[in-house]
Image (cartoon, rainbow, N blue to C red):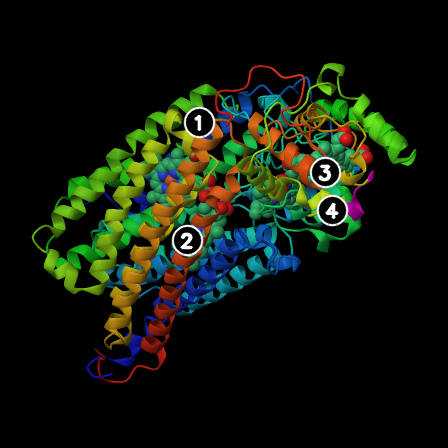
């Protein structure tokens, strides 16, 4: 056994190594790293900062990352993280797990009413979510939290929020003008070409079964189990989720439903599903809504293209 | 207590207190872990009770396993073997006991603060400033007691376990101070990307400079004792010790490979995560060669069994860790339950197993009586071993499902129903570990306080 390993050698030796390495891999990057803000950077408002505190206090960081990578396609992947995005963050909240989605570009993804319903209970807007409910925080804190997440993405978020506010006003006007007008107005927002397209695939038992399952996992909380718009999220959402039964005899084509599902209705709480559901699933759930709730489906109607090879 | 003078028994007061601390917090920490795992399958269950919500209790679980269960367990053993090896009593049992009491006050304060939402929200550095100060104070007190014991030694040469224990305590006190940015009481953080670099330098050091050296210290003590073989090589001990210190300290950036940190830091972190194979294998060769031909003795001794199993899981977790530091692998493993699996094999399978081994090694020796029940200790061994293996398998599968699905463009929400059954499995397996913790607690309490004269089956 080495005589040279005296207590002093052990203690001083290990401290010397540690401090040298702190200098190299912590101090040096800190001292030399470029810390100019990125082009989307802006500082947080007082309400956003208060919301961030609530975010920290409740451990949102253990389920949500705030760091988009080059390999991501999911939520928020419109912008890859840059060091200059974080220059105002102390502590930085990168997160190390994605039990939930990345939130670095969350601002403006949804209007405020969607977030409030979601915070009250995430199952209201996302039926198979495993995020904890936050109703116990009380409305005031939920509002602050909402302000914080709506600022995530900074200047990009501000642009998206502007869009949300612009369209929120329009959807409310349309809704308040009565169902007749609302349905027409909603349809008119869909590009002309889409409006004339029927659902190209025939109604089948399996297709409806798939549609049913997707409806349960994605739509139930807002539009309700019987499609009357009275899901548990309804009290928090304005304009309220659409009652599908009013769509009957109002020339709602498969194409309109498909487009609205794919793209969402910005301004209303109706989210887009293009990232969650591929084409066939969108047609399936759309036809499910048409057959069971609107009671009127144009599936496989005219004009038709060549039938797909898998059709029965 | 035939044959052993009471003064000598009393002289193990600190070690006893550490054992009890470790056993109690092990049980509580796994209970909290069960709740956390429960929320992931039933998010509405109890979750409207703010202070028990997932985001509040997850850091409680993690802080308790690290600072409540594993660290005190390993330090308990150190407070036994350092006086033994130095052939002198512990410098001060009073100071030792006071340290343990302060330690427990710190933990209780930390738990209450976290559940009330007082947190700095930096993983592994959540504790607020007053608690940070208490933690640093506790490590300082442990160090003082240790170094003064060593000063009084009647044995000139320091055995390798003593190096590890000393180095761990000194370096943890220091990295804890730096990593928690104690000089900034309000945030406890730097700003921007440098904060992430510092955080993971520190976070990684909790495993690398606290748990690992303390666990290796126990292994270096217990394995030669149990096998009654001399240590295989002292040169390897030296190489392993300094190698660990030099390499482990600067690979923390492998937690940030997909984040905009300077590329040179990532390169260092990746290269030296692979280089970790050297100190790891040097230690393992040394220990495994010491145990060679004596596996029967190890099997026959409950402490030996725990510690030896811990070394095997050390091999596993380190090789896995080196792989996880490769950017190509991390495209799939990062951000998901693969890492949680790795964390459980590391902290429970390696460090936790060795802590339990150390505990069972010293218990009969500090009480002067045989363990209350060898059967219960064996039962705990199997519960924990099956539990941690099960966790590893299940969480690795979940991680692969998540990682591959995301890489393939599926959304997080779409994958939730797919991983639900595995989350249910994780809870069921968790029951084994939690049961193991309670069985252990019962055994420790019986051994310390209510032990009859005769040994049970
Ligand atoms: C050669 C040894 C090791 C290497 C190279 C290594 C490498 C890694 C890497 C690359 C990660 C980050 C994974 C990611 O976020 O993608 C990680 C995480 C982790 N490691 Fe290890 N590891 C090693 C040994 C250990 C040991 C011995 C322990 C426990 C005592 C441990 C405990 C952990 C924990 C708890 C985490 C999770 C950190 C978090 O919360 O994100 N590791 N390790
Ligand atoms: C009853 C048994 C246990 C259960 C059910 C359990 C459950 C959990 C859960 C649900 C998490 C959070 C994972 C997430 O965010 O997705 C976690 C994290 C963690 N647990 Fe446990 N746990 C148990 C026992 C233990 C033990 C005994 C240890 C260590 C000795 C341990 C160490 C850790 C660590 C270090 C983490 C942090 C992982 C990371 O950040 O990557 N757990 N555990």
Q: Are marks 3 and 2 on the same chain?
A: no
The residue that appears at 16% across and 60% down in the rendered structure is B299
Q: Nearer the viewer, residue B230 or B46?
A: B46
Whether label 2 lies within 8 Å of ligand 2 gets the answer no
Q: Is A100 in front, or is A200?
A: A200
Picture quarter containing residue B100?
bottom left
Which label was assigned to residue A227?
none
The residue that mark 4 highlights is A233
**Magenta range:** A233-239
Q: Which mark is residue B425?
A: 2
Picture disc at residue A295: 3
Same chain for the residues at labels 1 and 3, yes or no? Answer: yes
The relative height of residue A138 versus residue A309 in the rendered view (above or below) is: below
Q: Closer to the N terminus: mark 4 or mark 3?
A: 4
Q: Which residue is mark 1?
A: A24
Q: Earlier in the sequence, mark 1 or mark 4?
A: 1
Rate crowding at label 1 as few (under 14), some (14 to 19) or many (20 or more) other CA atoms within 10 Å: some
| Label 1, label 4: how far apart the Cα atoms are | 53 Å
Of all residues, the one furthest to the left in this rendering is B293
Mark 3 vs mark 2, CA separation in Å: 42 Å
Q: Is residue A77 left or right of residue B398?
A: right
Helix, strand or loop at disc 3? loop
Question: Marks 1 and 3, Cα distance to the nearest angstrom?
Answer: 69 Å
């Amino acid at each position: 056994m080495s005589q040279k390993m005296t207590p002093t050698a052990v203690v001083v030796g290990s401290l010397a190594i540690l401090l040298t390495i702190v200098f190299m891999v912590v101090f040096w990057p800190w001292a030399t790293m470029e810390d100019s803000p990125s082009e989307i950077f802006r500082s947080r408002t007082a309400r956003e900062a208060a919301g961030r505190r609530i975010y920290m206090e409740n451990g949102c960081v253990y389920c949500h990352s705030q760091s988009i990578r080059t390999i991501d396609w999911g939520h928020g992947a419109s912008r890859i993280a840059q060091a200059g995005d974080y220059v105002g963050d102390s502590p930085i909240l990168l997160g190390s797990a994605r039990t939930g989605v990345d939130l670095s570009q969350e601002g403006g993804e949804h209007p405020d009413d969607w977030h409030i319903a979601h915070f009250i209970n995430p199952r209201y807007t996302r039926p198979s979510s495993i995020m904890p409910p936050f109703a116990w925080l009380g409305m005031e804190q939920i509002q602050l939290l909402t302000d914080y997440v709506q600022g995530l993405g900074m200047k990009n978020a501000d642009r998206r929020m502007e869009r949300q506010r612009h369209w929120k006003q329009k959807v409310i006007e349309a809704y308040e003008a009565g169902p007749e007008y609302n349905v027409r107005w909603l349809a008119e927002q869909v590009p002309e070409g889409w409006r004339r397209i029927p659902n190209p695939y025939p109604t089948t038992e399996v297709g409806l079964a798939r549609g049913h399952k997707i409806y349960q996992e994605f739509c139930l909380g807002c539009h309700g189990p019987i499609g009357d718009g009275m899901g548990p999220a309804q009290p928090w959402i304005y304009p309220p989720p659409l009652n599908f039964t009013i769509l009957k005899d109002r020339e709602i084509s498969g194409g309109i439903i498909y487009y609205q599902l794919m793209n969402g209705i910005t301004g209303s709480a109706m989210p887009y599903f293009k990232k969650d559901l591929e084409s066939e699933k969108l047609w399936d759930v759309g036809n499910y809504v048409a057959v069971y709730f609107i009671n009127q489906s144009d599936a496989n109607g005219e004009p038709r293209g060549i039938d797909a090879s898998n059709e029965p | 207590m035939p044959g052993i003078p009471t003064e000598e028994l009393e002289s193990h007061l600190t070690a006893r207190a550490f054992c009890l601390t470790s056993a109690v917090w092990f049980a509580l920490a796994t209970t909290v872990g069960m709740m956390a795992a429960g929320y992931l399958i039933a998010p509405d269950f109890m979750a409207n009770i703010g202070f028990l919500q997932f985001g509040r209790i997850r850091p409680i679980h993690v802080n308790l396993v690290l600072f409540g269960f594993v660290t005190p367990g390993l330090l308990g053993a150190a407070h036994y073997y350092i006086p033994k090896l130095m052939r002198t009593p512990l410098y001060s049992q009073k100071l030792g006991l006071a340290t343990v009491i302060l330690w427990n006050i710190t933990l209780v304060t930390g738990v209450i603060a976290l559940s009330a939402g007082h947190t700095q929200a930096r993983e592994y550095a959540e504790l607020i400033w007053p608690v940070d100060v208490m933690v640093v104070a506790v490590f300082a007190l442990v160090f003082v007691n240790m170094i003064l014991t060593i000063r009084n030694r009647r044995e000139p040469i320091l055995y390798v376990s003593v190096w590890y224990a000393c180095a761990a305590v000194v370096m943890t006190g220091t990295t804890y101070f730096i990593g928690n940015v104690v000089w900034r009481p309000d945030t406890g953080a730097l700003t921007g990307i440098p904060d992430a670099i510092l955080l993971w330098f520190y976070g990684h050091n909790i495993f690398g400079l606290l748990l690992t050296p303390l666990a290796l210290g126990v292994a270096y003590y217990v394995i030669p004792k149990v096998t009654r073989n001399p240590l295989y090589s002292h040169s390897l001990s030296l190489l392993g010790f300094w190698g660990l210190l030099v390499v482990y300290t600067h690979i923390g950036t492998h937690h940030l490979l997909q984040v905009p940190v300077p590329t040179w830091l990532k390169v260092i972190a990746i290269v030296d995560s692979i280089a970790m194979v050297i100190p790891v294998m040097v230690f393992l060769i040394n220990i495994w060669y010491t145990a060679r031909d004596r596996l029967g003795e190890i099997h026959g001794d409950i402490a030996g069994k725990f510690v030896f199993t811990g070394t095997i899981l050390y091999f596993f977790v380190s090789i896995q860790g080196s792989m996880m530091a490769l950017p190509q692998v991390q495209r799939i493993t990062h951000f998901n339950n693969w890492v949680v699996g790795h964390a459980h094999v590391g902290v429970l399978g390696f460090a936790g197993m060795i802590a339990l081994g150390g505990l069972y090694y010293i218990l009969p020796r500090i009480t002067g009586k045989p363990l209350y029940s060898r059967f219960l200790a064996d039962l705990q061994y199997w519960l924990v071993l099956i539990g941690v293996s099960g966790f590893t398998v299940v969480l690795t599968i979940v991680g692969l499902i998540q990682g591959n699905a995301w890489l393939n463009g599926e959304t997080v929400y779409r994958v939730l129903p797919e991983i639900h059954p595995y989350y249910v499995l994780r809870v069921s397996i968790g029951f084994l570990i939690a049961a193991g913790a309670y069985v252990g607690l019962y055994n420790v309490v019986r051994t310390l306080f209510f032990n009859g004269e005769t040994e049970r089956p």
